């Protein structure tokens, strides 16, 4: 795997994670009630793009091929869903074991997952249906 592909896969999630840590330390989640919404949307965007870059790499190696575009979208959404649900479980575990207050309830958890899926769905549609340079 070349450096450019690794960067496409890693940089986005890493940048969002760093931004999340800074926002937590500075207190933006408490200052702005809405700050959580774009962060989960952005998480879905970078997860979908990172997954797309990984799938493109495997496709270039002949290890992956999907010709039916809706299946490609479903695969990307599945990867975004898995990431979003894993993130929510991590938040729950932190609340349980470290007495943090990352989850405000079931409505907040569902909103977070939905925002990730909306962001990921947008990237899935764009990367699937817009012409790309190969």
Image (cartoon, grey):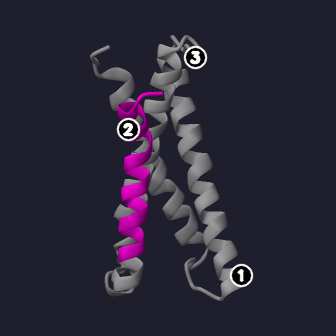
Local crowd at mark 1 within 10 Å, few (<14), some, or many (≥20)? few
> Residue shown at 54%/15% (left/top)?
66
* Marked residue nearer the N-terminal end (2 or 1): 2
Label 2 to label 1: alpha-carbon separation: 34 Å
Residue lying farthest right?
A: 97
Q: Which residue matches tag 1? A: 96
Magenta stretch, residue numbers = 1-22
Local crowd at mark 3 within 10 Å, few (<14), some, or many (≥20)? few
| Magenta stretch: dominant secondary structure | helix
Q: Position of residue 54 (x, y in %)?
A: 49, 31
- 27 part of magenta stretch: no
Looking at this view, is 39 or 53 the one in front?
Answer: 53
* Marked residue nearer the N-terminal end (3 or 1): 3
Viewer-side label of 3, 1: 3
Question: Judging from the image, what secondary structure is the residue with disc 1 in?
Answer: helix
Q: Looking at the rendering, which quadrant does residue 128 occupy?
A: top left
> Which of the labelled discs sits on residue 64, or is there none?
3
Q: Which residue matches tag 2? A: 8
31 w.r.t. 66: above or below: below
Name the quadrant of the C terminus.
Answer: top left
């Amino acid at each position: 795997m070349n450096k450019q592909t690794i960067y496409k896969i890693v940089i986005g999630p890493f940048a969002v994670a760093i931004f999340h840590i800074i926002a937590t330390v500075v207190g933006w989640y408490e200052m702005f009630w809405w700050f959580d919404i774009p962060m989960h949307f952005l998480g879905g965007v970078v997860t979908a793009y990172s997954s797309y870059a990984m799938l493109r790499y495997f496709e270039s190696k002949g290890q992956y091929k999907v010709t039916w575009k809706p299946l490609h979208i479903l695969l990307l959404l599945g990867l975004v869903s898995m990431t979003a649900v894993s993130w929510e479980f991590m938040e729950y575990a932190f609340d349980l074991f470290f007495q943090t207050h990352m989850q405000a309830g079931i409505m907040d958890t569902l909103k977070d997952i939905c925002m990730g899926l909306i962001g990921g769905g947008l990237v899935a549609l764009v990367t699937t249906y817009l012409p790309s340079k190969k």
